[in-house]
Image: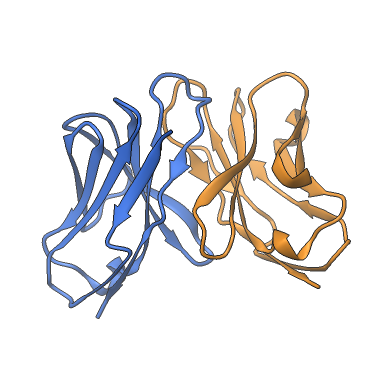
Chain colours: A orange, B blue
């Protein structure tokens, strides 16, 4: 079975710092990759996704993620975080043809003003 | 546009009591539906999913069950709650077909079993 690992459970940054959240998955075949975000008191929502093509994917609110197949990784990045980026971030994976997602355990990001 | 509703938002139940959580989707037809449990530090655990009326797949054996009596209604149930059933339950939907489709999540139900 596939699994998803998020390396950091908690990250604390100051505003304007750069962000990189790690995500690795275990499945060796073709995968679809997602990052979801849950802001305090809000629904879990999609940040960005990758299926094929350019491995650098841009999402909402200035986030981007890079798929590196050789490393089985899909790390999330943002050059300069804001206080409003405080949230929990989840990486998720599925395989083509499958209707379910496998989620990582999440990374709680706290951005101090 | 599509919306997803869950109720109740919060529930406090005694151990051994029954449970029924409801999820409904509006603005789409024949969606895939999902129940997840979210626990701090443990991410989202898929409990059940359904690709159609009356079709339920269970991902994790447990004290819970799911049903889909109507196309856009998904119910999570238990006959007798355990303390370990406490948690945050999320419902999600997705369009059928392509696995690239995004899952959309509801607001969740926070369940506390005492």
Q: Nearer the viewer, residue A103 or A3?
A: A103
- From this view, report whether residue A49 is shown above or below residue B5: above
Q: Position of residue A52 (x, y in %)?
A: 68, 20
Q: What's the residue at 50%, 67% (across, down)? A: B40
Q: Residue at x 30, y 26 (%)?
A: B29
Establish if B95 lies above or below B26. Answer: above
When asked about the image quadrant of residue A84, the answer is: bottom right
Q: Nearer the viewer, residue A42 or A4?
A: A42
Q: How many marks?
A: 0
Query: Which residue does the image show at 42% across and 52% down from the upper left?
Result: B45
- B44 in relation to A25, above or below: below
- Residue B82 x %, y %: 22, 70
Residue at 31% x, 53% y: name it: B6
Task: Give the percent coordinates (x, y) of residue B12.
Answer: 25, 75
Q: Quadrant of residue B113?
A: bottom left
Residue sitting at the far bottom:
B114
Q: Indicate left or right for A70 with B104 as reference.
A: right
Question: Residue B30, percent across and down?
Answer: 29, 25
Q: Residue furthest front?
A: B1
Quadrant location, the C terminus of chain B? bottom left
Quadrant of the drawing holding the N terminus of chain B: top left
In the visual, does B73 lie left or right of A91? left
Task: Say which quarter of the image contains residue A109.
Answer: bottom right
Foreground residue among B46 and B92: B92
Give the side of residue B90 with respect to residue A52, left or right: left
Residue B18 located left or right of residue A61: left
């Amino acid at each position: 079975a596939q699994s998803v690992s998020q390396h950091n459970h908690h990250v604390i940054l100051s505003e304007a710092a750069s962000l990189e959240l790690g995500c690795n998955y275990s499945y060796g075949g073709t995968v679809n990759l997602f990052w979801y975000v849950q802001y305090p008191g809000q629904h879990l929502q999609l940040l960005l996704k990758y299926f094929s093509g350019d491995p650098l994917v841009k999402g909402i609110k200035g986030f981007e993620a890079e798929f590196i197949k050789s490393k089985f990784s899909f790390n999330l990045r943002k050059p300069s975080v804001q206080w409003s980026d405080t949230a929990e971030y989840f990486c998720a994976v599925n395989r083509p043809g499958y209707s379910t997602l496998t989620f990582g355990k999440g990374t709680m990001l706290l951005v101090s003003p | 546009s599509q919306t997803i509703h869950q109720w109740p938002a919060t529930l406090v139940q005694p151990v051994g009591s029954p449970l029924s959580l409801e999820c409904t989707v509006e603005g789409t037809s024949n969606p895939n539906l999902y129940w997840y449990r979210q626990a701090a530090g443990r991410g989202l655990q898929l409990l059940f999913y359904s690709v159609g009326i009356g079709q339920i797949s269970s991902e994790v054996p447990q004290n819970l069950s799911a049903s889909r009596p109507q196309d856009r209604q998904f119910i999570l149930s238990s006959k007798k709650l355990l303390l370990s059933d406490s948690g945050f339950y999320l419902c999600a939907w997705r369009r059928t077909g392509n696995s690239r489709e995004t899952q959309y999540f509801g607001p969740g139900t926070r369940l506390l079993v005492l």
